[in-house]
Structures are given as structure tokens and as C-alpha cells.
Image (tube, rainbow, N blue to C red):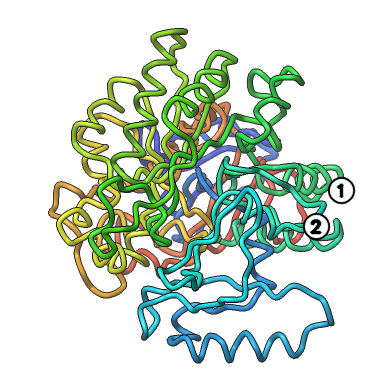
Amino acid sequence: MFSGGPILTMADPLRVDALTVQGDRIVWAGTLQECRASAGSDREEHDLAGRTLMPGFVDAHCHPLMLGQTQSWVDIGPRVAPSIDELVALLAEHARRMPQGAPLRAFGYDYRRLAERRQPLAPQTPTPAGGEIGRNPDGTPNGLLWDSACDLLTGVNGVKIRNHGPNIHLPEPAEVAARQLDRALHQFLRAGVTTVVDAQVSRREAEAYIAARDAGRLDVRVNMMVISAFLDEALQLGLVGRLGDDWLAFSGIKLYADGALGGLTAYFPEGYAAEPDNHGVLYHEPGEFSALMGRAHRAGLQTGTHAQSPAAIAIVLDAVEAAQRESPRPDMRHAIEHSGLATDDQIARMARAGIVPVTQPQHHLQFGDGVVRTVGPQMAQALNPIGHYARAGIPVVLSSDAPVAFPRPLEAVQAAVERRTVGGTVLGGPDLCVDLLTALRGYTIGGAYRAHQEHRVGSLEPGKLADFAILAADPTAVPVRELSAIAVEETWVGGQPIDAPESGPSG
């Protein structure tokens, strides 16, 4: 039983005095007297000592194995490599230390924050068959890779996903992948995250999760969305709904409509404000995308589609609406991942169709200034229109997109409330912000709703899994600017403390 500090349930009532846990479940949330009665005379009482207990965070869009993998790569972010010369020197230094023939990999790259505000050039790179390397008018590469060019990064025997999205599935030996996954999951747990949605799964990720589960090392609940390149295989195997248990489950299909705002590959038929001749990437023509969506929908598979620009979001909306007309299925909760620049009309269509936008406030925190420069200040003001989603009656869902941003839920909550970039720019007006409680719910019960898991996790209610975080302070009682500094002191999953001395089930 837990008492002695604020307990935020993310349910009704929002605050209770005590919580009773038996085994891996919550059995009561209410007054101290009620919880003592439900726990029985042999109960073990945990004094929060003024700290705050709340549901474990649910990260509804992330890439855990990739997060662990990038931790072994070279950090070339603008903080350590602010110019091209420094970036090249840093890579060269690491290359000299590496074994002969080992790949040199880096993360954190953002050319818009380099002193030169351009991509480094590598004119010797050949164009692969079936793919494309973006090139400037003089033939020098501009730093962009498309289609099978991304597949080349995975090696001869690596995962290939063709034109179904950027290939993030770089291979590692099984023992190396295991260590990388352990490291990543530890980061989620330290941040109070107890459930994740892996938003792009191939055999590489599935094998790592299954191995971790079999070895008893999977301490975070994982919902896997398989990349659409393997939709045929999933349907042939009869995977036409959720399959798995409370720890590891296949939960749907991930699709791509366009690319990223950060790399100027999001799809703008009219061109970018900063680069009028650059239209970005459209991974599937509208008809092809609609066919993919229709096949997944008819099979009862929830989808999550990466779409950033208004044009790409429109393609997703058209496809979902067409699929529902052809084969009505209530409560599918098809998701639009990121949904960075949805228009007011598109948000209204999402509300009518029951589509869930999955947003990452740390994107506008970290990259908002760059988006202002590339798409123009007027359009960028509405980047991540979370407040408009809430006012349209759409459930707010927040996430990290790790490793694009680190899993720091309270930083994301603060960003959703403030809408301030690292450069100090406030994007848009108050109507685009959400209040603190809405943002907290977006990273708990909102994330659970996105994954069809709201009956299991996301709030502290009887019958739900006993997954919770204990914070050093009450996030509803500190200034918003101090939210990201609140420490997560303990994380409990299934009634057990993680990264703490082993103990029996609490009562």
C-alpha cells in the first residue's frame, strides 16, 4: 500500500490519498482507510514521504532498439560539431580509432544548425540501382537518400524495406543488440516510462524483444507496429489483430506517407519556402497508399502513418475515409504519426473519422527554429497543433520519437504547455497550447488509448496493471518552467520496483 504524498490517478477522482497493490494489479485507489481495509492486516505500507506517485508514462511512438544503438555511435549534434569542418574532423578522429572495415555511424545531425547552414558534400558516392541520392545541379550529393539507397546502409543481408520508409534497421550481432536494447529500456525506466509503442518493427526489433522476453530482461511493456514492407507476410501468417500478452504484443502496421521536416523530405508539392525546387519525398502515390491502408484496415489491423505536411496528411485522411466507407470498422483508432502541420479542416476530419494524431512536443522544442526557416514563419507557427486537437475533442497523445528526442516525458509535457523552442521562440498563440493536466494525460492515459491499452495501463484504477512512477515533486504544483527538472526517483512495473533491490509483491 502507498500513501504519504500526492497520488495522481489520471482518472476520476484525479487525486486519492492511498493506493493498494496486490500482485501485479491495483486493487484500490481511495482514502487511507479504504486502502488499509482492502490491503488487509498483513499489509506492507510504503511511505511516499511527500513524493508524488502517478501512472507510468506511456510513450506512444519511439524506437527503443535504435535509441540503444545510437548510444554507441558518434554524437555529431550542433553542440559538439557546430560547423562542417568540426563535423568532418570529429568523424575522422573516430574513424582512426575504429577497427579496419567497421562502419562509422553518427547521430544528432542537423545541418540547419551548422554554421554553414548546408549539407556536407561527397561527390564520389555512386547512385544505387533502384534508389536515388539527392544531388545538386553540379552533380554533388546534397545529403539526401531515397528508397533503396537507404537499404544499402543495412548491408547485403540486412533488412530491406524498399519504398516503405527510411531504413533504420541497421544490423548488429544478437549479443550486441541485446546490450543496446537493455541500455535503451533502462533509459525509459529511469524516465518513468513503463509502456512503449515501437513505431517501426522489422525482424531485427522483433528478434531482440523476443530474446529479451525469453531471458527475463523485458521490464518495459512493448507494443510492436510492423513496417508495411512486411504487410504481406503478416497477412499470410494470419496476424489480423493484436497478438501477444501484457509484456510483448504485435499491435498493428506502420506506414509512411512522406518524409521528415528536419531533413526537408516532408512532401510539399509547392516546394519549401527555403528551397522552392525541393518538394520532399512521397513514399507512395495516393492510389498505392490507399490500397495498403485498405488491406490493413479490412484485416482489422490498426495503422500508424508517418505524415508531416498538409499534402501527406490529406493522403492519409482520404485513405482512412475510403477504407471505412468500404469496410466500416468502429473504433479502429488509425493514427497519424507526428501530424506536424495539420490544418484546421484536417483536424476536423480526424475528429469525425476517429483518427488519432500522435505528437512529439520535443520536436518543436528542439527543431522548431529550423522548421521556421524551411517552411516559412507563417506555416511553422502551427507546428504540432496540440491545442487544436484537444479543442476538437481528439484525445491528446504525446510521445518522444526516441532517439530523435530522449525519453523525457516531463520535458515533453512542458514543451506542450509552453510551445517554446530552444532558441526562445514561442510558436503560435495560446490556442495551440494545452493545459498541464491535458499534457500529463497525453503521456499516460492518452498514450494507452492510442495503443488500445487504456483498460490495462495509463491510469491508477482498480484492475489495472500496477505500473507507476514516483516523482520528487508534484508536477501540478510547480511552475511550468520547472517541470522538466523534476526527477523520477522510482519506477514500478507490475507491482515491482525496477532498478531497486528485489522485494516481494506489495500489499
Q: Taking 208 as reference, is 392 above or below it?
A: above
Q: Which mark is residue 178?
A: 2
Q: How many marks?
A: 2
At label 2, counting other C-alpha atoms closer than 10 Å, the crowd grade (few under 14, some 14-19, many 20 or more) is many
Q: Are marks 2 and 1 in contact (CB under 8 Å)?
A: yes
Residue at x 71% of width, y 49% of height: 219
**Quarter of the figure that contains the N terminus:** top right
Quarter of the image with the C terminus in it: top right
Which of discs 2 and 1 lies nearer the camera? The answer is 2
Which labelled disc corresponds to residue 271?
none
Residue 159 x/y as whole percent: 74, 48
**Observer-nearest of 194 and 203:** 203
Report the amino acid beneath label 1. Ala
Residue 139 in sight from this viewpoint:
yes
- On the rendered structure, is 247 left or right of 326? right
Q: Is residue 414 left or right of residue 196?
A: left
Q: Position of residue 299 (x, y in %)?
A: 60, 15
Tell which of 362 and 185 is nearer to you. 362
Instruction: Give the quarter of the image for residue 209.
Output: top right
As shown in the figure, which amino acid type bears the numbered disc 2? Ala
* Residue 356 versus residue 482 in the image, above or below: above
* In front of the other: 444 or 102: 102
Relative vertical location of residue 446 with respect to residue 382 in this rendering, above or below: above
Tell me which numbered mark, 2 or 1, is placed earlier along the sequence: 2
Asked whether, in this view, residue 465 is left or right of residue 446, the answer is right
Q: Is residue 33 visible?
A: no
Q: Residue at x 42, y 66 (%)?
A: 486
Residue 275 pos. (x, y %)? 29, 63
Mark 1 lies on residue? 215
Residue 427: x %, y % from top left: 20, 60
Q: Residue at x 25, y 29 (%)?
A: 393
Q: Secondary structure at mark 2?
A: helix
